[in-house]
Amino acid sequence: MEFTEAYKQTGPCCFSPNSRYVAVAVDYRLVIRDTLSFKVVQLFSCLDKISYIEWANDSEYILCGLNKRPMIQAWSLTQPEWTCKIDEGPAGIAYSRWSPDSRHILTTSDFQLGLTVWSLLNTACVHVQGPKHCSKGVSFTKDGKYAAICTRRDCKDYVNLLSCHTWEIMGAFAVDTLDLADIEWSPDDSAIVIWDAPLEFKVLIYSPDGRCLSKYQAYESGLGVKSVSWSPCGQYLAVGSYDQMLRVLNHLTWKTFAEFMHLSTVRGPCCAAVFKEVDEPLHINMSELCLNDEFLQGNSVELIPFPFLKDVSEGHFRVMYDVTEVPISLPFQKPPADKPNPKQGIGLMSWSKDSRYIYTRNDSMPTALWIWDIRHLELAAILVQKDTIRAAAWDPTCTRLVLCTGSSHLYMWTPSGAYCVSNPLPQFNITDLKWNSDGSCLLLKDKESFCCASVPLFPESSEYSSDD
């Protein structure tokens, strides 16, 4: 892997959808860099510090949220002189997002008073009263034709279906939730999943015309759903809950066909590979060092510091994975019973591109990442880190997983094994990471800087094939 130098950032950073640019917030300035040369191609000045940024799908426009104002500003890469500012006055703007056509912006006002659709083509705008959430509760079909927006009125949750062409309401239906948490279209746009707030375990599957296809409730007492994710193929729906279980539903009967437990002690029989991060002291064979004739004759010789020797003298270590046999006990943190939002349950999960693998993190065991094989319905691997796992992301083009823990290392897993990659930048601790859309580059964030790393293409050999 090759790393760029570190560049300053004070907030969000993200690749454009076409992978040609990376947008970086530096206080009130929006810096657009080319991903090949990393030269600045555009520089925009906002009216206040940038809180969040989002690219339009066509990579031509980008919006900046200014929470301190509150307002948003949008910019065009092809027309730098073009500007757009949206300010809803006393109502404020709590969140904003692009529509799939890249020509409309959806804003949600403070206290969920209303959701407004703003057109960049004319001065028209459409209002939706009583959105359920600010940043959640809105989902678009994959073809970009329809939007599902959750609203609440008369103490009941509703789903409004809007056309993304005319922004007219095509229909609305009530949903059987106590306190709707979020909504998401299936990858094939044939169904909508809705899940309830943690106080009640309830997952509902609706058709676009409002028919309830299925209602799933794993248990009644205790905190319920914590995370939900469709597989890219659309055949599986993963549900992570506070009882530290991952349940997978199929798209034909909407019944569970797999339940995976996250126990603090993993015992056999188990075919999973357990990779444990360890420190190995650096060693060097001093017996092979010798002085050349030029130095012995007293000639002037420039001595160049050798960083490897420096690491040894300071007691540095090499980070690596040690393959461990089961049984193994994982570090477990019992959440306090007297505090809200307990750190337990499946708080992090994501599917691989081919829908064969899904990784999970049980928040009460934050240093362990579990990788499950859906085809064989078994645990494929466990990555046990020294520090809390901050972020993890699948390669968008193949079965390769990358994660970070706030250290100076990257950690990668493929079906053939796991390995550690050292970041050569000094005092650069990786706290977040993102892939670009073609899987050739990683964006790595430190507290006040960022860099990018070019990633070798995944070998197309049988050794790495997900069909093994």
Image (tube, rainbow, N blue to C red):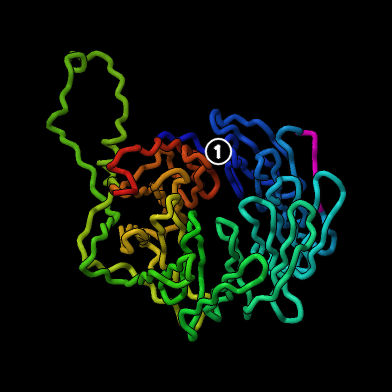
Q: Image quarter for residue 346?
A: bottom left
Residue nearer the viewer, 275 or 306: 275
| Side of 248 where 79 appears, left or right | right
- The verdict on residue 85 being magenta is yes
Circle 1: is it few (<14), some (14-19), or many (20+) Cα within 10 Å? some
Residue nearer the viewer, 27 or 149: 149
Place of residue 375 in the rendered image (x, y in percent of width and height, measured from the top left): 35, 58
**Above/below status of 34 relative to 388:** above
- For the N terminus, the image quarter is top left
Residue kind at label 1, given as amino acid type? Tyr
Place of residue 405 in the rendered image (x, y in percent of width and height, measured from the top left): 42, 55
Q: How many marks?
A: 1
What is the magenta range?
Answer: 80-86
- The verdict on residue 196 being magenta is no
The residue sitting at 60% across, 41% down in the picture is 16
The residue sitting at 62% across, 67% down in the picture is 207
Q: Secondary structure at mark 1?
A: strand
Place of residue 53 in the rendered image (x, y in percent of width and height, measured from the top left): 66, 49
Place of residue 249 in the rendered image (x, y in percent of width and height, measured from the top left): 45, 68
The residue sitting at 75% across, 45% down in the picture is 103
Q: Residue furthest left?
A: 287
Can you see residue 347? no
Q: Which residue, given by chain and number where applicable, does mark 1 sit on? A: 7
The residue sitting at 50% across, 79% down in the picture is 217
